Amino acid sequence: MALSEEECLQERKWWCFLLSSMLTFAMGVTGVIVARIFKFIFYREEEEYVERRPQPPTGDEPAITPPSDIYAEAKNWAGELISGQTRAGKILVFCVFILSVISLLVYFRDASMEGVEHCTRFRDNLSQQVDMAFNIGFMIYFLIRFVAANDKLHFMFEIGSFVDYFTIPPMFVSIYMDRTWIGLRFLRVL
């Protein structure tokens, strides 16, 4: 049974949207710290037993790229992509800029409506659908920046990362809850 707008808004759910942002941040930082701890414990033990010089490949075995080289390749690719110094990087930076501006315009449109919280189904709310598409783009850009970051923990505390924490997770919550909250979407201007 679908509730009317007035019945739905009798109980405000703004805290769910804010909580999703804070939990995303906390889980991300915790994940980075746990990964550092594992790397410190397990990688250090391997260093004692692994010889540093690579063995020359024999003629009958195909050369296999070690996992560390694959990670380095991905990190270099992501770094080049977000730097804006290659053609693909310039296109990506320009697209993210355009997405940010349009997302801000969608926010202005939603903020001009009466009320901060609305109970509208996702399939009936065009601005929410557009914002969702943009947030998927921002999430991909966040992941590329994360891969390219030299210090993952420092990256988690950058202003651009906080903008993503407070704008992307609430969109997924709004789909689940069939309601939208203007909240901190204005941070996208940063």
Image (tube, rainbow, N blue to C red):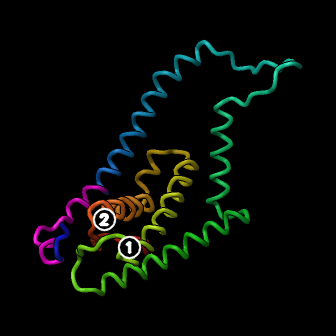
Q: Residue 66 at x, y = what percent?
A: 69, 29
Rendered image quadrant of residue 37: top left
Task: Check disc 1 and report the residue beneath it.
Answer: 128
Q: Amino acid at mark 1?
A: Gln
Query: Residue 164 versus residue 37: which sits nearer the camera?
Result: 164
Task: Check disc 2 and report the residue beneath it.
Answer: 174
Q: Residue furthest right?
A: 59
Q: Residue furthest front?
A: 1
Q: Residue drawn 75% across and 28% down?
A: 64
Rendered image quadrant of residue 15: bottom left
Q: Relative to 40, is 178 on the left or the right?
A: left
Magenta stretch: includes residue 68:
no
Magenta stretch mostly in which secondary structure? Answer: helix
Query: Residue 116 versus residue 188: which sits nearer the camera?
Result: 116
Q: Residue drawn 63% across and 53% down?
A: 79
Query: As displayed, is residue 52 above or below residue 175?
Result: above
Magenta stretch: includes residue 17:
yes
Q: Residue 151 at x, y = what percent?
A: 51, 45
Q: Residue drawn 48% across and 62% down?
A: 136
Say the numbered circle drawn on residue 137. none
* Marks 1 and 2 close (CB-CB < 8 Å): yes
Q: Residue furthest top?
A: 49
Q: Relative to 25, is 64 on the left or the right?
A: right
Query: As displayed, is residue 11 above or below residue 38?
Result: below
Badge 1 crowding class, 10 Å Cα cut-off, few under 14, some 14 to 19, many 20 or more, is many
The CA distance from mark 1 to mark 2 is 9 Å
Which stretch is magenta? 5-20
Secondary structure found at label 1: helix
Query: As displayed, is residue 139 above or below residue 44?
Result: below
Answer with mark 1 or mark 2, whichever residue precedes in sequence.
Answer: 1
Query: Residue 146 versus residue 64: which sits nearer the camera?
Result: 64
